Amino acid sequence: MKKLFIALPFVLGASVANADQIQTKVEQMMVSSFKANGIASIDRQKQDAVQKACSGLTPPDAETMKKLEAAEMATIKWPSDGNFTGGDWKEGQKIAASGRGLTWTDKTPDNNGGGCYNCHAMDPKEVSEGTIGPSLEGYAKLRGNSEEVVKYTWGKLWNSKAYNACSDMPRNGYGGILTEEQIRHVMAYLFDPASPVNQ
Amino acid sequence: MKKQLLLTALGAAIVLTAPLATAADDELNFDAYREMLADGNPAELFEMEGEELWRTARGPKNATLEQCDLGLGPGVVEGAAAQLPRYFADTDKVQDLESRLMHCMEAQQGIPSAEIINGSFGKGERGKLAALVAYVVTHSKGKPIAVDLSHPKVKEMYDMGERVFHYRTGAMDFACSSCHSQDDKRIRATQLPNITKPEGAAAGWGSWPAYRVSNSQFWTMQHRLWDCFRQQRTAEPVFASDVTIALSVFMAGKGNGAEAQWPGVKR
């Protein structure tokens, strides 16, 4: 009897709670359960439009996706001098291999890695490669280096969400993960005929 | 006796460190290596320390933890971890093993929870708590995970945990689901369980806490989640905070029925 008495209020409480209330509680919890540490500020717990729209159990409808993608496309900074691929592929290789940066144990928000190998195959000789993203082995050998391909690749590296609002890939340029110069090096790693990616 | 075990474990760790360096290159598969280690899991050392801590009178109240109720009655350790997290009426909270032990340490021994919450993994009272975890989970090894989702507060935590799992945020837009919602994926050479499926959730929940060979540390689930969030590039989760409980309920509940392999052993 005593047990029943205790349990009753919770049962009533649960029946009132609906999906919206749970969502509100989750949003509050995603702030209140965290604390700032070094470069990892509490602002990181607040979602922007893309993050919010892509956090459901199902992706947003096609129209919403298009709107989000258009807004993200507008954030892409294209190279002012038209130099898309003139970086150093050897530098690009280092950036692709490094998954470091932007955690609360990193001292500076700069000098980050691109973390490319965490998810993508690139150099066919590298065996320790992630599989979440598509293989990029032979990138330019397979796709060529037309203006369209080069421009798409720059845009995808700068802000992946411009092409797929719910892409798993971070927004390297827009998010301040990589600098324009670093992105140019990664472009060289993908497009330079001498790069191991294209061997 | 204790020293002898220590030496045996250290010997095993040294011998087994050698194949580790090449394991990833050779086969990208840690399973065989893990099997080799399972017989002499160095987590035993932490388990022994934890058992001693459980029985030792400590803290301002100079009490043992032998009256701590982990859900199956005061002092019952056998099978308790397999049914956690659960709702506790005395705290009116859903608690995982770590937050429950922390509660017992404060209520019975007078050790302030704040000391653990504001501490660091592997150090001070939070380090001692990890040893207690090793002791308690060992007594649920091979038991089926059995989290009671019929309690409304537990079910609510499960629902919140599922949403947290898909909640994208931080500097790289990641959610737990970014890495853990597909079958047979890897980050570099590390295999990722698909936690949206019962077998993947059980693989994750049922193999932590674990001894990590690469750094010779025993990591609890709170520690594991903390490092997941670090790599997710969020702000730092507070020890035993609601978000960690919600995710734990989600994983454990999703994995219900599978055998717990505690304590695990990891690269």
Image (tube, coloured by chain):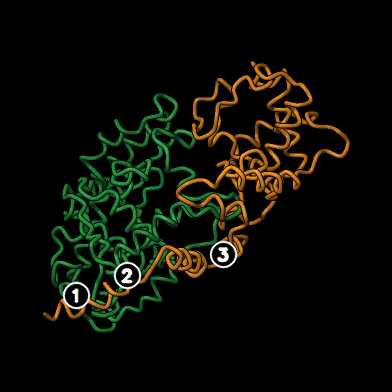
- Kindly identify which chain the residue marked by label 3 belongs to: A
Q: x%, y% of residue A192?
A: 73, 22
Between B80 and B160, which is closer to the camera in this rendering? B160
Spatial separation of the CA atoms under disc 3 and disc 2: 35 Å
In the rendered image, residues at marks 3 and 2 fall on the same chain: yes
- Kindly identify which chain the residue marked by label 1 belongs to: B
Q: Residue at x 31, y 35 (%)?
A: B15
Q: x%, y% of residue B14?
A: 33, 39
The amino acid on which the numbered mark 1 sits, given as a three-letter code, is Thr
The amino acid on which the numbered mark 2 sits, given as a three-letter code, is Ala
Between B99 and B249, which is closer to the camera in this rendering? B249
Mark toward the start of the polypeptide (3 vs 2): 2
Q: What secondary structure is marked by label 2?
A: helix
Residue underneath mark 3: A37
Q: Residue at x 46, y 42 (%)?
A: B179
Q: Which chain is orange?
A: A
**Mark toward the viewer: 3 or 1:** 3
The amino acid on which the numbered mark 3 sits, given as a three-letter code, is Asn
Residue underneath mark 2: A14
- The reply to whether residue B48 is in sight is no
